[in-house]
Image: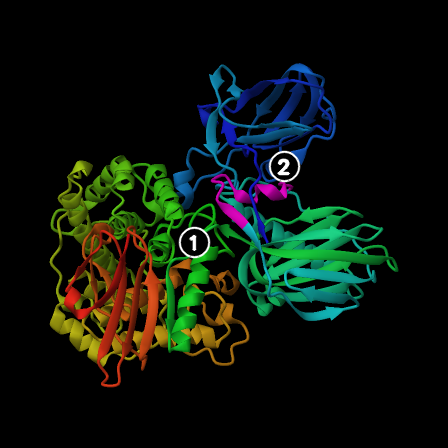
């Protein structure tokens, strides 16, 4: 079952147009009730403290605390009925603490204060929006519901799952299985889990008080989970009714709990990407839910695969709970498909698609377990599979908009200098893949600004001057390697920028980035990280002769990541070595599957045989503690691009797939393959097989308006009208 959107306008975060320069203000909204209204309730969240008034009468005073911005609070003293006539709702807000800023989230510089609210009743719905007054001005919209830095709000109605953009849906999960249970009867049917028994333990978990506003949602939740996990470890839960479930794969998951019993049930639950994380990570998801008799409670979605629930209540009293698990993500229509006689390649494609799908949320998240910021390099890589899979690029566009418009001059995106380069490259690749001229022209101002900022930090003849804030890869890497790799990223971006400027002169991009001359040997030193070498090859700094020599002699070895692994596969295919590229895809992504992956990971190692704790075994970036390592990362969906371009052979020659070369490549012993890739002109389907003579037979169904290059090599079955 899909949970559809509600037919109401969701509340917006609002404040005075001067934002944090106006820390004391009054938000007001007048409205008219056409008739007497019953079942009235008022819910709000805000930075600071507030006096809440209705028709001039003080209803409640809420003291300032950081937690006021993390949850909808229902104002208990608000009248439960309103008489017909004119009314005025008034929030007198005073704020001494605002959301902190760091370079990593500087693009949120104008979202440091805010208030959000909704008033509901029988036939009444009034949500905070720009129609409210802020002192003498019209209120300014700070951000949409769900956006950073505030993120999801506790105590949200289940229908708010659609998010501020209105495109997120919740779908029932139908592959929940019971792993273990203690002092409980559990029955599973599809997405529904029924838990019955008698309480063996009781207890109360005091929700920790948020001490300060955080940079973004997940930092707030991480602090809360660690505090709650500590409390959990001190509770006497040996006799508690406990169940551990596997929801079938990793998801951004919520559950709906219905209490069919006669007494209150307290649910203490933990979620993790792995069972080891569930048992050992002091920062794993730890939540506390109380469900009264006859009540239905819905949790906020979080990223996990495994869940442990401890059912608490008055000892000896029976309980009867029904849980429904749902996956939450943007409603995407999958166009891109693959079916071949390689079971492994099919599974790699499908798991990559699943990884991509569930990371489509308010933004294009790097992974569902962790940060909900838009990370520029992560969505640059994630977008590579998006173009082939989905027929809607709205999430890519809003991620690109947010970083482009939000990051002011004088700042690198996400605090990392080459992330600004990856953002520019994202825009360039977006245009090639989609031909969406209107969106790229919308980005004219931020493109000019960020291109200019790069040039300001460039010394004539030397390329980028920046010596700090370089990341490049998630393995140990020296400062000198970073500077060399940065020069390659700079060169790659310059190549794309020239093409974009030539295709769209309306952008009026003026730039004269000098390109430093570097020899192949600068990139190919044996001790250098793989990413330095692959970036050198991709950028053209490494000569064809040196690139081929390296590719012929290289043997895959740790440390690498799905990032450098994908770059390596592309380098092999750049020089026609598709079998070696397939071996990279097979060993890295197939290796994850062999180790039980249901989504593709942030990091990988070629040999983790016998590893009990994948998070620890995979940690290659020295700044990470082991359990921060994610087993779901959208950037690892990139094999979809390689499969589409090489195995299916679909290669766009003009922006928007106006002309296309189709040149499939049998690899890995595959003898038959069919698939569809999404294009702006419509689905493009390719089927091929090796006949009894070993000759390649290719059949194509192309959309109207698409020119196929060298059509004589193909069997064109039809053109869609």
- Horizontal relation, residue 250 to residue 702: left or right: right
Q: Residues within 10 Å of mark 1 (few under 14, many from 20)?
A: few
Q: Residues within 10 Å of mark 2 (few under 14, many from 20)?
A: many
Question: Magenta part of the protein: which range?
Answer: 155-169
In this orientation, does residue 153 appear? Answer: no
- Horizontal relation, residue 501 to residue 65: left or right: left
Residue beneath the point at 79% across and 53% down: 260
Question: Which residue extends farthest right?
Answer: 316
Query: 553 or 685: nearer the eye?
Result: 685
Secondary element at image label 2: loop
- Looking at the picture, how far across and down is residue 608, in whole percent? 46, 77
**Residue indicated by mark 1:** 333
Query: 626 or 305: nearer the eye?
Result: 305
**Residue indicated by mark 2:** 72
Q: Mark 1 and 2 residues: CB-CB less than 8 Å, in contact?
A: no
Residue 197 to residue 219: above or below: below
Give the number of marks: 2
Residue beneath the point at 12% across and 68% down: 543
- Looking at the picture, how far across and down is residue 622, in whole percent? 42, 63
Query: 239 or 236: nearer the eye?
Result: 239
Residue 390 is covered by the magenta coloring: no
- Looking at the picture, how far across and down is residue 614, in whole percent? 50, 71
Image quarter hosting the N terminus:
bottom right
Which quadrant would residue 572 be assigned to in this image?
bottom left
Which quadrant would residue 715 be assigned to in this image?
bottom left
Residue 259 to residue 247: above or below: above
- Looking at the picture, how far across and down is residue 181, in whole percent? 73, 69
Residue 314: mark: none
Query: 481 or 689: nearer the eye?
Result: 689
In this orientation, does residue 43 appear? Answer: yes
> Disc 1 to disc 2, how far (Cα)?
32 Å
């Amino acid at each position: 079952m899909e949970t559809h959107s509600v037919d109401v306008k969701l509340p917006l975060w609002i404040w005075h147009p001067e934002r944090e320069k106006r820390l004391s203000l009054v938000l007001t909204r007048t409205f008219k009730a056409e008739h007497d209204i019953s079942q009235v309730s008022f819910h709000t969240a805000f930075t600071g403290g507030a006096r809440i008034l209705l028709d001039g009468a003080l209803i409640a005073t809420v003291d300032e605390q950081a937690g006021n911005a993390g949850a909808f609070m229902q104002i208990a003293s608000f009248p439960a009925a309103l008489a017909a006539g004119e009314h005025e709702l008034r929030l007198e807000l005073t704020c001494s603490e605002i959301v902190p800023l760091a370079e990593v989230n500087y693009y949120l510089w104008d979202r440091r204060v805010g208030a959000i609210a909704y008033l509901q009743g029988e036939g009444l719905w009034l949500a905070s929006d720009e129609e409210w007054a802020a002192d003498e001005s019209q209120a300014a919209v700070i951000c949409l519901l769900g956006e950073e830095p505030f993120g999801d709000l506790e105590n949200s109605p289940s229908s708010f799952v659609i998010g501020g953009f209105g495109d997120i849906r919740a779908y029932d999960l139908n592959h929940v299985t019971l792993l273990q249970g203690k002092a409980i009867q559990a029955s599973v049917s599809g997405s529904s889990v029924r838990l019955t028994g008698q309480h063996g333990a009781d207890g109360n978990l005091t929700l920790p008080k948020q001490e300060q506003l955080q940079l973004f949602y997940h930092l707030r939740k991480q602090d809360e989970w660690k505090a709650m996990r500590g409390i959990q470890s001190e509770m006497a839960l040996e006799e508690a009714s406990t169940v551990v479930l596997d929801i079938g794969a990793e998801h951004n998951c919520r559950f709906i709990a219905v209490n069919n019993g006669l007494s209150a049930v307290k649910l203490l639950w933990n979620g993790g990407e792995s069972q080891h994380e569930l048992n050992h990570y002091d920062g794993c998801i730890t939540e506390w839910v109380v469900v009264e008799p006859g009540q239905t409670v819905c949790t906020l979605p979080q990223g996990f695969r495994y869940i442990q629930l401890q059912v608490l209540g008055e000892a000896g009293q029976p309980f009867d709970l029904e849980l429904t698990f749902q996956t939450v993500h943007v409603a995407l229509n999958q166009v891109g498909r693959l079916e071949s006689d390689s079971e492994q390649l099919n599974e790699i494609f499908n798991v990559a698609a699943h990884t991509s799908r569930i990371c489509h949320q308010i933004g294009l998240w790097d992974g569902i377990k962790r940060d909900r910021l838009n990370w520029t390099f992560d969505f640059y890589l994630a977008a590579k599979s998006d173009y082939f899979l989905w027929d809607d690029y709205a999430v890519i566009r809003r991620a690109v908009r947010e970083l482009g418009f939000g990051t002011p001059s004088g700042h690198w995106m996400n605090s990392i200098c080459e992330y600004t380069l990856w953002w520019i490259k994202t825009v360039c690749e977006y245009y090639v893949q989609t031909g969406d001229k209107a969106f790229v022209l919308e980005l004219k101002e931020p493109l000019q600004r960020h291109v200019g900022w790069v040039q300001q930090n460039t010394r004539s003849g030397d390329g980028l001057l920046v010596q700090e804030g370089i990341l490049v890869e998630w393995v140990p890497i020296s400062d000198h390697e970073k500077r060399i790799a940065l020069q390659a990223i700079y060169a790659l971006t310059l190549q794309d920028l020239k093409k974009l400027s030539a295709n769209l002169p309306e952008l009026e991009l003026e730039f004269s980035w000098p390109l430093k001359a570097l020899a192949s040997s600068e990139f190919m030193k044996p001790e250098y990280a793989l990413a330095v070498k692959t970036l050198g090859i991709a950028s053209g700094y490494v000569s064809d002769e040196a690139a081929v020599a390296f590719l012929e002699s290289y043997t895959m070895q740790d440390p690498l990541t799905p990032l450098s692994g994908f770059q390596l596969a592309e380098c092999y295919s750049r020089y026609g070595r598709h079998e070696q590229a397939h071996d990279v895809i097979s060993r890295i992504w197939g290796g994850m599957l062999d180790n039980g992956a249901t989504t593709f990971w942030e990091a990988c190692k070629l040999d983790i045989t016998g590893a009990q704790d994948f998070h620890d075994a995979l940690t290659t970036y020295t700044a990470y503690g082991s359990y921060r390592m994610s087993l779901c990362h959208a950037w690892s969906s990139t094999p979809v691009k390689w499969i589409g371009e090489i195995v299916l052979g679909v290669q766009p020659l003009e922006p928007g797939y106006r002309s296309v070369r189709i040149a499939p490549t049998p690899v890995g012993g595959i003898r038959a393959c069919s698939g569809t890739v999404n294009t702006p002109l419509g689905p493009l389907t390719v089927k091929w097989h090796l006949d009894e003579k070993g000759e390649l037979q290719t059949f194509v169904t192309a959309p109207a308006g698409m020119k196929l290059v060298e059509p004589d090599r193909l069997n064109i079955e039809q053109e869609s009208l």
